[in-house]
């Protein structure tokens, strides 16, 4: 089940042009393209006649012509031409979705059109600050329900076992987690004191010796995460004190767009507080991050299958507190959106981590 009244990432901006771009978001078939002036457009990808995907047709200026009988639809989804018919048939209309562009990404509003407010797009606080560098992002599809990804991104402990050659090391195995429920999601965090710097970060950290490391995992509704990494010389890490001059800061932005109940498209980029202009650093991060996220992909797709086909009960661990609170908070929002009758179903799915195969 999905929250509809929310902005999701639909594509990277440079994926859209004057070719028809078919996609599926929250189980809905969508076709996107750019108008001649560059404005992105998203329409339902099914002609109302025989449901041929409009993406199999062609662009005529800023309108889409169906490849079966030539019905033409404008950017609002209204049919403007129906060859062979004396007048445009009633019901010759496809849905049009609000879009907005931010951070090089195209965002789509999947709910009530009159509730679409571009100011509600996830905020990247470092964006536009010249002292921060950008690790150019990427995307991948993962064959799992999106809630296994929000679980993963509220679970700092998994790095010890899933990412031992990159994000994690032995220091990440035992340290307890703090969980905080906020108005728009959940934060799970912990300090690791006097620890070795994990392999992924070691080449970039500007000090030698052990570190104090903060892992800050935060997921906002519906499914957008910011993972903040802080490394500072051992003994200098505090929650509210001034930052050490050699502190390493990285904010990793992770946007999950459900394709359907069993598949998710994962978009990401990182901001870093050092070497802002270095292409080499950006490239090295991009490669390491993609490698590490591929490790998650293997685990999460197998978890999805394991949970969907389980023949014995599963258990929860103390580290599941944050993920389960997020699931419950999101389920409450979905239930409010869908009406009271849906509440038992939604809450049951959330508490059991249960999803359809
Ligand atoms: Fe991971």
Image (cartoon, helix red, strand yellow):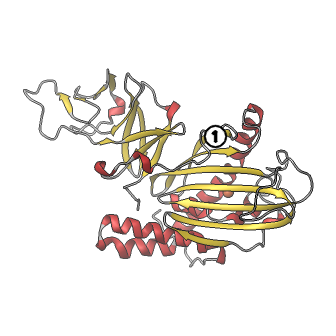
| Residue furthest front as drawn | 242
Mark 1 secondary-structure assignment: loop
In depth, the one of 12 and 120 nearer the eye is 120
x and y percentages locating residue 93 in the rendered image:
21, 39
Report the side of 63 relative to 347 (left or right): left
> Does label 1 point to a residue whose CB lies under 8 Å from ligand 1?
no
In depth, the one of 43 and 185 nearer the eye is 185
Q: Which residue is mark 1?
A: 129
At 26% from the left edge and 29% from the top edge, which residue is drawn? 68
Residue 230 found in image quarter: bottom right
Residue 145 makes an appearance in the image: no
x and y percentages locating residue 119 in the rendered image:
43, 47
x and y percentages locating residue 1 in the rendered image:
41, 62
x and y percentages locating residue 69 in the rendered image:
22, 27
Report the side of 351 relative to 114 (left or right): right
| Residue furthest left as drawn | 86
């Amino acid at each position: 089940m999905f929250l509809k009244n929310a902005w999701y990432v639909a594509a990277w901006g440079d994926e859209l042009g004057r070719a028809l771009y078919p996609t599926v978001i929250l189980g809905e078939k969508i076709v996107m393209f750019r108008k001649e002036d560059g404005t992105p457009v998203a329409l339902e990808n099914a002609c109302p006649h025989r449901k041929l995907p409009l993406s199999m047709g062609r662009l005529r200026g800023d309108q889409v012509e169906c490849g079966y009988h030539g019905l033409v639809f404008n950017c609002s989804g209204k049919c403007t031409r129906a060859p062979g018919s004396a007048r445009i048939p009633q019901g010759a209309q496809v849905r049009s979705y609000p879009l907005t562009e931010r951070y090089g990404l195209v965002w789509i509003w999947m709910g009530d059109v009159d509730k679409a407010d571009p100011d509600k797009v996830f905020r990247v606080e470092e964006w536009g600050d010249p002292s921060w560098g950008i690790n150019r992002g990427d995307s991948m599809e993962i064959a799992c329900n999106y809630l296994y990804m929000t679980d993963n991104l509220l679970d700092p402990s998994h790095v010890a076992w899933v990412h031992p050659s990159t994000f994690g090391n032995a220091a990440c195995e035992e340290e307890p987690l703090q969980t905080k429920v906020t108005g728009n999601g959940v934060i799970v965090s912990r300090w690791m004191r006097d620890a070795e710097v994990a392999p992924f970060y070691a080449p970039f950290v500007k000090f030698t010796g052990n570190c104090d490391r903060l892992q800050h995992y935060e997921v906002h509704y519906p499914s957008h995460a910011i993972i903040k990494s802080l490394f500072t010389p051992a003994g200098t890490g505090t929650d509210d004190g001034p930052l050490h001059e050699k502190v390493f800061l990285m904010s990793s932005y992770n946007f999950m767009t459900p394709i359907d109940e069993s598949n998710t498209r994962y978009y990401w980029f990182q901001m870093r507080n050092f070497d802002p202009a270095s292409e080499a650093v950006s490239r090295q991060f991009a490669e390491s991050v993609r490698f590490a996220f591929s490790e998650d992909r293997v685990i999460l797709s197998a978890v999805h299958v394991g949970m969907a086909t389980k023949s014995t009960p599963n258990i929860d661990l103390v580290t599941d507190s944050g993920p389960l609170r997020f699931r419950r908070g999101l389920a409450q929002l979905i239930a409010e959106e869908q009406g009271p009758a849906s509440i038992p179903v939604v809450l049951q799915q959330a508490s059991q981590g249960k999803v359809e195969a």
